[in-house]
Image (cartoon, rainbow, N blue to C red):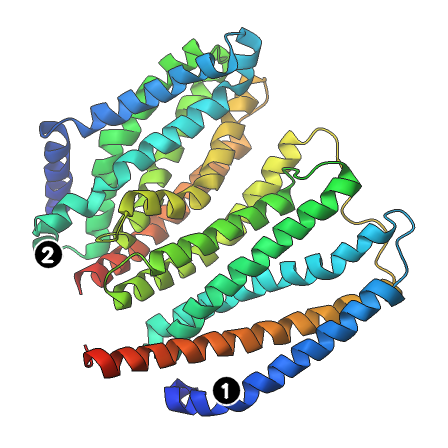
Amino acid sequence: MPRFANPSQFMKLSSYLMPVCGVAAAGFIGVGLYLALFVAPPDYQQGEAVRIMYVHVPSAWMASLVYALVATGSAVGLIWRHPLAHIAAEQAAPLGAGFTLICLVSGSLWGEPMWGTWWVWDARLTSVLVLFFLYLGFIALDNAFDDQERGTRAAAILAIVGVVNLPIIKFSVDWWNTLHQKASVFRMGGPTIAPSLLWPLLVMAVGFLFFFSALLMLRMRSALMHARLRALTFGNP
Amino acid sequence: MSEFAALVRRDLNLAFRQGGDWANVAAFFALAVILFPFGVGPEPELLSRISAGVLWVAALLAALLSLERLFQSDWEDGSLEALVLMPLPLELQVLAKCLAHWLATGLPLTLIAPLLALVLHFDTAGMGALVLAMLLGTPVLSLIGSVGAALTLGARRGGVLLSLLMLPLYIPVLIFGVAASEAAAMGFTPRPHLLLLAALLAGSLALAPWAAASALRQAME
């Protein structure tokens, strides 16, 4: 790990890895979209609308995965004073918020034809919404100080506090939902997913993962260049 | 321990002598609750149905209102830097400040909550559970809030930022507080919800001072 702490080492490595990830993302998402839109059969109940799942589910997975990454990066940055870890956490957070938003919006678009409503105060929807607010809080706190260093470290502590709280929030929202919801609007489980639907989903998920990696490296590279530019123009603070 | 008590006493003196922070918080709580009947209509059934939720949401916002001041004034006049030099560990100082904050805001909220509950036609059978839940829940608000207050020290637009940071973290307290009050009002036992609130209190009592103290150390660097 100390080897990757060196920003110039990272710049060198990522200059190769970033295009690879980008091409892989385009390939996987391209194939995945083809499989999802043309090959996968429509659902016997939901019809063609089930295809929203191929965007909705991978983005939901990415939303939680990226939060875990933000929290890990923040913890590593605070404990070992690892500068790249902080930059990774900071640059991953807006991407994670984006995935969370995609998840919420696509879920809402899917919910309208299926459940007849744009929004249900279902436990799962609610906890994704809370996750979105945690992301927004992290980003806002990161940008709230004149001294960037202070913002970085404050946001890092917040990310760790959020990780401790997420399971509690998730649990309490599940509890709240079972208390309040009189009749279930929809059923969550149903039959286990058929292989013909599962494969395109997994291809899309891998594509999303590559897409995120490429974007994260791009953002980290530009953040590092930005920092270097500032140091060159204004003198090292 | 005498230092701990001295710090609590100092904060309480400051809170009660300069401008009545606690009175502001209690007044905000009462006003927010009283606005609801104007908003949703005066039907007793409707009010009694939403009363527990309204009381808790208003209490949560009232607690949030006073949080910004938890460390802000000490930070601005420099006394926070003197406090850090005290032999008492910073974690315990945070605990002392939270205790003082709760005595000045959470306790008044708890005491006037039954009066406001009556105005909203909250079922009197649930009154005991409501007060007990408030006693357990409001210290959690102060404790979790101390982390946010320490993190936003010196931030631009600290107040709005603090609400954005804290409201998601307050959701569990809101859920279990309302659940305990409603369960008792409907004739069920509030015990599981109260136990969960107590668990939240125990957890935040153990963890929040660490997070807040490390955030304070960041702010002082």
- B128 or A159, which is in the foreground? A159
The mark total stands at 2
Q: How many neighbours does mark 1 have within 10 angstroms: few (below 14), some (14-19), or many (20 or more)?
A: some
Using the rendered image, report if marks 1 and 2 lie on a common chain: no
Do labels 1 and 2 touch, CB within 8 Å?
Answer: no
**Furthest-front residue in view?**
A233
Q: Is residue A170 above or below residue A201?
A: above
- According to the picture, the residue beneath numbered tag 2 turns out to be B81
Residue A162, image x and y in percent? 44, 55
Residue A233, image x and y in percent? 23, 80
Which element is circle 2 on?
A: helix
Q: Nearer the viewer, mark 1 or mark 2?
A: 1
Badge 2 amino acid: Glu
| Residue at (49% x, 40% y) in the render | B172
- B206 or A83, which is in the foreground? A83
Which element is circle 1 on?
A: helix
Chain letter belonging to callout 1: A
| Residue at (18% x, 77% y) in the render | A237
Q: Is residue A198 visible?
A: no
Q: Which mark is residue A14?
A: 1
Q: Is residue A45 above or below residue B213?
A: above
Chain letter belonging to callout 2: B
Badge 1 amino acid: Ser
Residue A76, image x and y in percent? 40, 74
